[in-house]
Amino acid sequence: MATGRTHRPATRSRGIPEATVARLPLYLRALTALSERSVPTVSSEELAAAAGVNSAKLRKDFSYLGSYGTRGVGYDVEYLVYQISRELGLTQDWPVVIVGIGNLGAALANYGGFASRGFRVAALIDADPAMAGKPVAGIPVQHTDELEAIIRDNGVSIGVIATPAGAAQQVCDRLVAAGVTSILNFAPTVLTVPDGVDVRKVDLSIELQILAFHEQRKAGEEAAADVTQAAGTTNSAVAAKREDSSTDQGPDGDVPAVMPA
């Protein structure tokens, strides 16, 4: 069985921009959903909408793959699934180790989507001796003392760090020294790695803070709109009052005298 140690995707050597690479999983997710519904073809507009990008950007991205679709027909869904999967390196087996089996690490271990996307959880590793041997998602947890041997024996090139922030850099250093060249970091800290090692960071707190910023901005815009609306209502009332008072004035603008009975 092929492993991540001997096969690597060719995106960089083929000159595909990183921004395009980052969007390929979005296209693949949308295409997989279409495939599961037995949809044979899809237009660039439909696929772009499903992936959350504009159709011009999608067509440009696909041009890097050598896929241009057929005018009036669109793209063959199954072929695109295969093409993007191949480009991302998902047509082979990628053994992965998860280090740090707390709540987050255990949740990742129990995630059922790894296998269907070309990833196999080869080992779960934790520094707590009390965790050793305990099964999580059907896989016994192993102690960090065995980390290097596990990576070597399983040909692992992708590591997932789900440890507390204080332990993340040390774990990262050990993974890299053992031969891991790609790291997915869930720890709330920035990792330092040598050239040739790729790190992707997932920080849930940062994403929530960004959402909080947008919520605050929307609340400010709504408050400003309320103030504008209130000011408009007040101005209309003042104008109406002035108009009413002007009808009570005489020809010269004075209040008319009382007429005799």
Image (tube, rainbow, N blue to C red):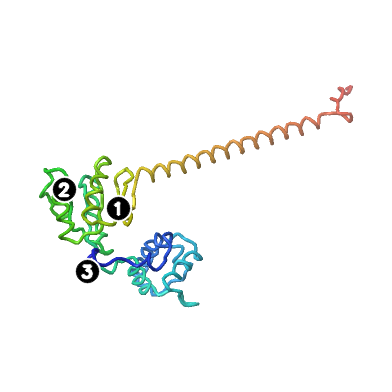
The mark that comes first in sequence, 3 or 1, is: 3
Question: Gap in Å between the C-alphas at discs 2 and 1?
Answer: 18 Å
Give the number of the disc on residue 10: none
| Mark toward the start of the polypeptide (2 vs 1) | 2
In the displayed structure, would residue 55 be above or below residue 251? below
Q: Vertical placement of 180 versus 33: above or below?
A: above
Amino acid residing under circle 2: Thr
Whole-percent x and y of residue 148? Answer: 17, 53
Mark 1 packing: few (<14 Cα in 10 Å), some, or many (20+)? some
- The circle drawn on residue 184 is 1
Percent position of residue 93, x then y: 23, 66
Secondary structure beneath dot 1 equals strand
- Categorize mark 2 by other alpha carbons within 10 Å: few (<14), some (14-19), many (20+): many
**Residue 144 in the image: above or below residue 230:** below
Q: Name the residue under label 2.
A: 144
Q: Helix or strand or loop: what does disc 3 sit on? A: loop
The front one of 172 and 161 is 172
Image quadrant occupied by the C terminus: top right
Q: What residue type is labelled 1?
A: Leu
Q: Which amino acid does label 3 sit on?
A: Ala
Residue 8 vs residue 127, the one in the foreground: 8
The secondary element bearing badge 2 is classed as helix
Residue 236: % across, % down = 69, 36
Cβ–Cβ under 8 Å for marks 2 and 1: no
- Residue 1 quadrant: bottom left
Residue 231: quarter of image: top right
- Report whether 231 appears left or right of 198: right
User: Taking 206 as reference, is 220 left or right?
Assistant: right
Would you name the residue on which mark 3 appears?
A: 2
Cα distance between the residues tagged 3 and 2 = 25 Å
